[in-house]
Image (spheres, coloured by chain):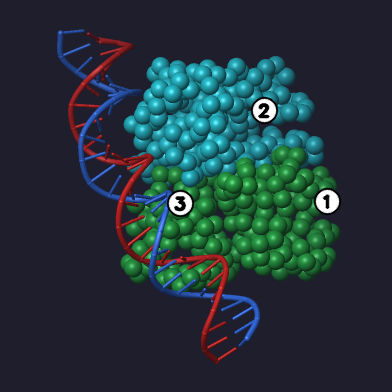
Chain colours: A cyan, B green, C blue, D red
DNA sequence: CGTTGAGTTGATGGAACTCAAATAGCGTGG
DNA sequence: CCACGCTATTTGAGTTCCATCAACTCAACG
């Protein structure tokens, strides 16, 4: 964390995305985090939740340093470190995949606001439930799916999440490297490569390094997801 | 749903398991549900959450009637239909795997209690967060794991969940059939069979139809989970 | 121009899927 | 109580798909 400055939610262009409803009076700390740096570490006490403003944070669940697994890529507008609120300490580590900007919302402060506003509390529960559903989505992305189906689903999923946040679809950046994608999808990086080139051969996408373009979204979905 | 009777939480032997903390004044409806019958259907409006008292409810996520997937087996003492609170309608269908008894907690009533008691609201958020974490657990059970690792993990997971609720471990019932297990783990029922017999051959477990006994829990964990 | 790291491509073996047949459970009715 | 039939489960043989290991391309950088 290099820079850190305070900012009021009212002046943040994204605040209605992270907490729909009025959250007046809640001041956030905003941090800039360089590529490869750790935002929060597994084992840390969870005293805040994070909202991604730009970039991409990967959540890794490292039982050991040897066998780490990527459980999530948090995109701009999305919330992070929810799941750990139930526990004393975080079970995941958050690492910036590229230069990112993140809002830090102190749990203490949010909790107090919730206590005073039942409406906000309910709204927050809804967000929690949605986060839980997202975890299930990533499950259905993996299970019982062939490698090329996982890749196709992954791309479409990223695309959809970008669109929710208002960013134009089709053009994806894939700031994470092939190993991270492979890890996340439960396959090898070589297989990621092969699948991408195979999809490109079918002219469903075009690939140039980290820049991926979806050429035929319908075809992609019909041939690999619905099938 | 054949029978349905009202019951006060105070007189339920399990009430402190489902909502730790005082939830005085909340009356539940209790239902009996026969094997194979539907508790709630995908698309239904979500106006209640369920607590399993006995039996087992499988949650299936049916994109189509053709390609259904089992996303969870809810065991006695566990909560159901959390994830859907965020949406207008349920995205999963709950089906009884065997004769089961379930408490129905009206969301409306619970919501009102939360509004009056910040403590309860926080407690409930904690439960939501835990439910989200459970979804992740089932992800790490599947991804990047060989079939026999999934089976071993599945058995140990069931075992642990039974023990949390006070029921003795070691002896598992597996009221669901092989197809459901296979579906849940993202493999084929034939593979489930082969893995179970393989584990039995190594004298880590013993299998007789739906009755599975864990003979060597440590060995099971060391050889298939930690590996 | 050589080095380094990420990404791609090729060849091979093993694990899991598929299809098919055999067997075991289990409830039903004689 | 036993025979019967139905379904669930197990076992077998052949095939497909992905992991593995290794070589190779390409771009960035000193």
Q: Which mark is residue B109?
A: 1
The answer to whether B203 is drawn above or below residue A106 in the figure is below
Mark 3 lies on residue? B187
Write the residue at 52% across / 28% down.
A220
Secondary-structure class at tag 2: helix
The answer to whether B52 is drawn above or below residue B42 in the figure is below
Q: Are marks 2 and 1 in contact (CB under 8 Å)?
A: no
Write the residue at 47% across / 61% down.
B155
Using the numbered discs, state the Cα–Cα distance from disc 1 to disc 3 in whole angstroms: 41 Å
Using the numbered discs, state the Cα–Cα distance from disc 2 to disc 3 in whole angstroms: 37 Å
Neighbour class for label 2 at 10 Å: few (<14), some, many (≥20)? some
Same-chain check, marks 2 and 3? no
B225 or B89, nearer to the observer = B89
The answer to whether C11 is drawn above or below residue A27 in the figure is below
D29 relative position to C12: left or right: right
Chain on which label 2 sits: A
A67 or A4, nearer to the observer = A67
Q: Nearer the viewer, mark 1 or mark 3?
A: 3
Give the tally of numbered discs: 3
Same-chain check, marks 2 and 1? no
Write the residue at 51% across / 69% down.
B210
Neighbour class for label 3 at 10 Å: few (<14), some, many (≥20)? many
Secondary-structure class at tag 1: helix
Q: Position of residue B54 (x, y in %)?
A: 66, 67
Neighbour class for label 1 at 10 Å: few (<14), some, many (≥20)? some
Chain on which label 3 sits: B
Q: Which mark is residue A18?
A: 2
B126 or B101, nearer to the observer = B101
Using the numbered discs, state the Cα–Cα distance from disc 2 to disc 1 in whole angstroms: 27 Å
Q: Is residue A30 in view from this perspective?
A: no
Q: Position of residue A68 (x, y in %)?
A: 40, 40
């Amino acid at each position: 964390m290099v820079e850190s400055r305070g900012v009021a939610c009212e002046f943040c262009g994204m605040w209605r995305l992270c907490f729909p409803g009025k959250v007046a009076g809640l001041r956030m700390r905003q941090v800039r985090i360089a590529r490869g740096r750790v935002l929060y570490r597994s084992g840390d006490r969870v005293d805040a939740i994070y909202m991604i403003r730009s970039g991409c944070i990967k959540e890794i669940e490292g039982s050991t340093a040897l066998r780490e697994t990527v459980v999530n890529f948090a995109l701009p507008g999305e919330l992070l470190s929810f799941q750990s609120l139930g526990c004393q300490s975080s079970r995941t580590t958050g690492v910036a995949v590229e230069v990112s900007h993140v809002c830090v919302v102190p749990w203490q402060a949010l909790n107090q606001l919730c206590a005073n506003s039942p409406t906000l509390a309910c709204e927050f529960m809804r967000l929690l439930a949605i986060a839980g559903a997202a975890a299930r989505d990533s499950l259905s992305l993996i299970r019982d799916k062939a490698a090329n189906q996982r890749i196709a689903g992954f791309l479409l999923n990223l695309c959809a999440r970008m669109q929710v946040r208002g960013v134009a679809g089709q053009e994806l950046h894939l700031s994470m490297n092939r190993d991270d994608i492979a890890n996340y999808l439960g396959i090898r990086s070589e297989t990621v490569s092969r699948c991408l080139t195979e999809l490109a051969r079918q002219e469903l996408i075009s690939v140039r390094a980290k820049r991926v373009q979806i050429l035929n979204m319908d075809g992609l979905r019909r041939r690999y997801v619905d099938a």
